[in-house]
Amino acid sequence: MGALKSLAALPEPPPRPGSGHLQDWARAPLPLLEEGARRAREGGGSLFRLRLGLPAVVGFSPEWNRRVLTDLASFRSAGTFPRLVPHLAGGIVLTDAPEHRARRGILNPAFHPAALAALRERVRLACPPVPTAEFDALAWADRAVLRMLNAAYFSSEFPEGLLDAFLAPLRRPFPSPAWPRPRLFGRVRAELEWLALRRRASGGGGDLLATLAPLPGGLEEVRVSLAAAHDTTTHALAWTMWHLARHPAWHTRAGHPAALKETLRLYPPGWMGSRRLGTSLEWEGVSLPRGTLVLYSPSLSARDPAHWEAPGEFRPQRWATPPPPWSYLPFGGGERVCLGMHLAQLLILEVLAALPPLEALGDDPSPWAGVTLGPVGPVRVRPRQARASLEA
């Protein structure tokens, strides 16, 4: 058995003098990751390093994903990227083992499919009408998801302008999402407390706020899960609308689940996950020291040609068989799988069921990786009957 190599021996994308990979990470992280993965594969491995101001490694193999997402004692959430974003810095997102399992046990019932089924009708009614002429699917999805989440969490009682202002920083490039906004957060907190008080006084409400508010730290979980839900669901919905417009044969109730899965494979909103090593680790013959920033990429893993045929193509038919284990992670995996996974799927599938046949206009949108992975926009589509009317 040979001696372990140091982290510095790992392949890496070309760094920039003085800033390493920080500049490319901020401006264009997807090409940076793809170049790192290419170099790792050329060297016969699945791990590469990034220079982000502290020791950082990116892995994309199924084995790496499984280890990172199941070994909660070694791979810690404290000190990772969500802590940099005030909207996400709290609650279950930053709770580590051993407390995490008990905390999830308390929260999971509210987001169980059976519990969410009771919200189906109210979120369906909250969805705005689909435009009858050309429109931007990204902007429309943003508004639709905002209103549907308002219905699911607050019975549509949260002031829409304040809700939009609260979520807006997450849609902007860094460093905007990392800026503290104490006055805005204070207004949101006051509104949450007022709505929760009304539910306690009335003895119910039937929404997620009524379920979560009585729990210890419940209002923080409402704020964090709401922030985590909006842009991820918006971007997944907009991408799926685009793909259905390009591939209308899949725009059926039976076809929607596979189309959504394939969209999430190609463009997982949570394109990057992060952990910190709580102990030293050896991987692929490399010694990774305690404190290393450990990254896994659902985007890289779901486009890895070692595990996916024609990985860059939209092929919903591939979902007739199970995906390669630990290669498809749009909602993470293991004990820390996304708390709002079933809620996001409910919202998106309800919207897709209400959409008329669509036609895509223009070229494929370019992806943009911020807090979440979304299309640059606009995503121009129109109902197909609109085209028929113009040609008549």
Image (cartoon, grey):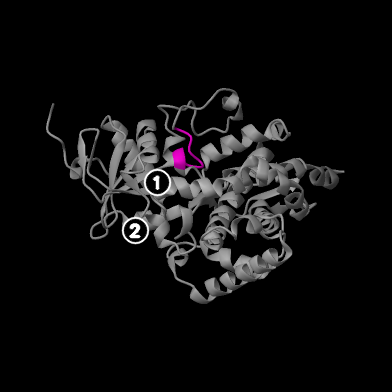
Q: Earlier in the sequence, mark 1 or mark 2?
A: 2
- Counting from the top left corner in percent of width and height, residue 315 is at 58, 29
Amino acid tagged 1: Pro
- Check residue 23 in the rendering and tell me which mark sits there, or answer none: 2
Picture quarter with the N terminus: top left
User: Does 246 sit left or right of 185 as displayed?
Assistant: right
- Counting from the top left corner in percent of width and height, residue 385 is at 82, 43
Q: Quadrant of residue 49?
A: top left
User: Does 141 sit left or right of 39 as displayed?
Assistant: right
User: Does 44 sit left or right of 8 as displayed?
Assistant: right
Picture quarter with the C terminus: top right
Amino acid tagged 2: Gln
Residue 25 seen in this snapshot:
yes
Q: Quadrant of residue 68?
A: top left
- Counting from the top left corner in percent of width and height, residue 250 is at 69, 32
326 or 8: nearer the eye?
Answer: 326
Mark 1 crowd level (few <14, some 14–19, many ≥20, 10 Å Cα): few
- As drawn, the residue found furthest toward the right would be 392
Q: Quickly name the residue at label 1.
A: 31
- As drawn, the residue found furthest toward the bottom would be 183
Relative to 349, does residue 284 appear above or below in the rendering?
above
Asked whether the beta carbons under mark 1 and mark 2 sit within 8 Å of each other, the answer is no
Mark 2 crowd level (few <14, some 14–19, many ≥20, 10 Å Cα): some
Give the residue at x 61% y 26%. 317
Q: Secondary structure at mark 1?
A: helix
In the image, the segment drawn in magenta is 327-335
28 or 276: nearer the eye?
Answer: 276
